[in-house]
Amino acid sequence: MNQAQDNILIEVRDLKKYFPVRGGLFQRVVAQVKAVDGVSFNIRRGKTLGLVGESGCGKSTLGRAVLRLQQPTGGEVLVDGKNIVHLGKRELNEYRRRLQIIFQDPFASLSPRRTVAQIIREPLDVHAIGTSQERDKRVIELLADVGMGAEVRDRYPHEFSGGQRQRIGIARALALDPSFIVADEPVSALDVSVQSQVLNLIAELKIRLGISFLFISHDLAVIQHVSDEVAVMYLGKIVERAGVDDLYNEPKHPYTQALLSAIPVPDPLTGRSRIVLEGDVPSPMNPPSGCAFHTRCPKVMDICRKELPPMVNAGTSESPHQVCCHLHQ
Amino acid sequence: MAGNNKKVPLLSVRNLVIEFETEQGVVRAADQISFDVDQNETVGLVGESGCGKTVTGLSILGLIPSPPGRIVSGSILFQGKELAGLPDNQMREIRGRDISMIFQEPMTALNPVFTIGNQMIDVLMRHRGLTRRQARAGAIEMLAKVGLPVPDKRIDEYPHQLSGGMRQRVMIAMALSCDPKLLIADEPTTALDVTTQAQVLEQIRKLQQEFQMAVVLITHDLGVVAETCQRAIVMYCGRIAEAADINDLFARPRHPYTRGLLDSIPRIRTQRPVELPIIPGRVPDLLHLPKGCRFADRCERRDDQCSQVNPELSIAGSNNQVACHHPLQYKDSLS
């Protein structure tokens, strides 16, 4: 048990991020959008937590709040046991070196007016690491890490395809030897034939460099491939969290079951019953009472409309399977 | 095969070549594209970005922006009528009435300053010659058919008041309101969440039955193709790589590119592989295409012939075609 505790790199406790909605004559706060509403999870060293959910569920906001790219409204983010939510700028900068992010759109996240070498060197320059020659050498190592040759150093981002740009973005994220990377939909903008190349790269880096990932995606197949543990998010809350095999083989929350059954299968001969959910995701500004999923849940009961179910462990103590649903109380 | 009693296809595209003028030179976005679509049939046009699938779809409706684009050669026969080079005023009669199109991002196709009703009523009055009152009733009925909740209220709302899934439904309702014989759907569910995608695909399938129309589904998602199409055309770099019945395509792909695509898509598996199979390299730049087969650089079956001669699309089995010098062979397929 103690060893498991030691292995935890990131611990998120009851994290909240609310956005005020202003309106009326004096732009008063008239409502709150609870983008992230009381989320807790751990990520162990060298492991990947996959975070999956539909658009607007708060998964990207959660990723940003964990890194304090957006200041959380409440809750704690512990990095190696130290809460970083209230750290001052200077102290935070020390932690920032170890925490990095890769963005979805490799076209928007790289400056078009800088060369590849300048882009990858920037974090080293900002944190004043090594001499200038050492930094140049490091850039070449980093390019090799992501499968690119030194000859691309003086070229500009527009000269590269989407997959290669994403590699450059990954090289930049690796520059400071981070122990934790938030990957926010890193392959969603890429074509299928390069998507798998980048996914393999991320999986390899995790093993070779021992980096922990919070891997955010709407794509359950991608999440399955890269994750050790998976959390499913719906309207600002995690509704189910389990080891990857448990979650995919025995999904317990009706939302997870519906998500899994909704994916089109690339095999015309697989006939299967699909759970087609009714309606749309409700507005996070005005979430339904009780369990937020009750408006679309095929197994809704009376209690679901009134009471929010607590998170319980429906698995074992060795392989926990957390689920937030009245069916599993 | 007895070719003489084969029924005339609804749409017949032959040797279509589309080029775009760019600052760097002329780009051939679609090169020698030929395919047929029968009545009531759903055909998938599959490929990665830049393969020419959208341009091919747009050309059927005469929507290639010109300049810079133009149809260089080839023909597009729709019910025996030549659409390539048809003057715009004649094209307008066909567009929306006989052939409709839906797009990936409904917000770009819906006019933000008019209500849903206004936009639908115009189309119905123009193509069907209805009065305003009849057209409004028809529009409400159509919105109900695509599964929009409270259609008589939604009809007076503006596009921004609807969710993405609802907008896509409205666009489908608009596209189908004149009972077209052919629907061209360009990535209709790509911008949607997976649960909404399931709803919309279900809806398209249902409406296709009801309206007895043919659908050309343009998509990059082989999962969507497997679940909705009877036949699929795989495109690569402006050319058709393979065209086959859906069961053949997925069980016995003949083109190495199709095989690679099928292997490399992440899919839910019971056993996770350590590494995903990949297609090495990347799609060549359309401005600097290789001389021979465009897939040769990434293909493990290539030889000298492949880098010299671009393979033609040839018959491979009763209904199938492949453009490859060394297509994959299967023992159990006698064709």
Image (spheres, rainbow, N blue to C red):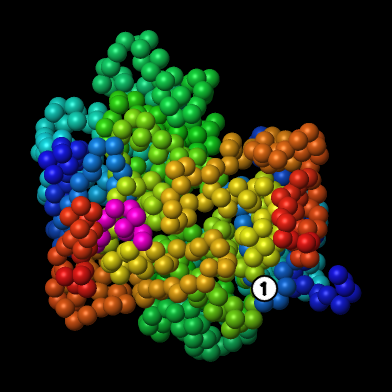
Residue A46 located left or right of residue B322: left
Q: Residue A138 location, x and y as percent?
A: 38, 18
In the rendered image, residue A21, in percent from the top left (x then y), is placed at 20, 58
Res B295 quadrant in image: top right
Q: How many marks?
A: 1
For the point 31% across and 21% down, which residue is it? A124
Q: Residue at 25% of width from left, 74% of height from top?
A: A294
Image position, residue A160 (x, y; %) = 53, 33
Quarter of the image with the N terminus of chain B in it? bottom right
Quadrant of the rendered image containing residue A98: top left
Secondary structure of residue under mark 1: loop
The C terminus of chain B, quarter of image:
bottom right
The residue type indicated by label 1 comes to Glu
The magenta segment is A239-249
Q: Give the camera-side residue of B293 and A6.
A: A6
On the image, numbered disc 1 is attached to which residue? B41
The reply to whether the magenta stretch includes residue A242 is yes
Can residue A138 be spotted in the picture?
A: yes
Viewer-nearest residue: A57 or A98:
A98
Q: How packed is label 1: few (under 14 Cα within 10 Å), some, or many (20 or more)?
A: many
Q: Is residue B64 left or right of residue A201?
A: right
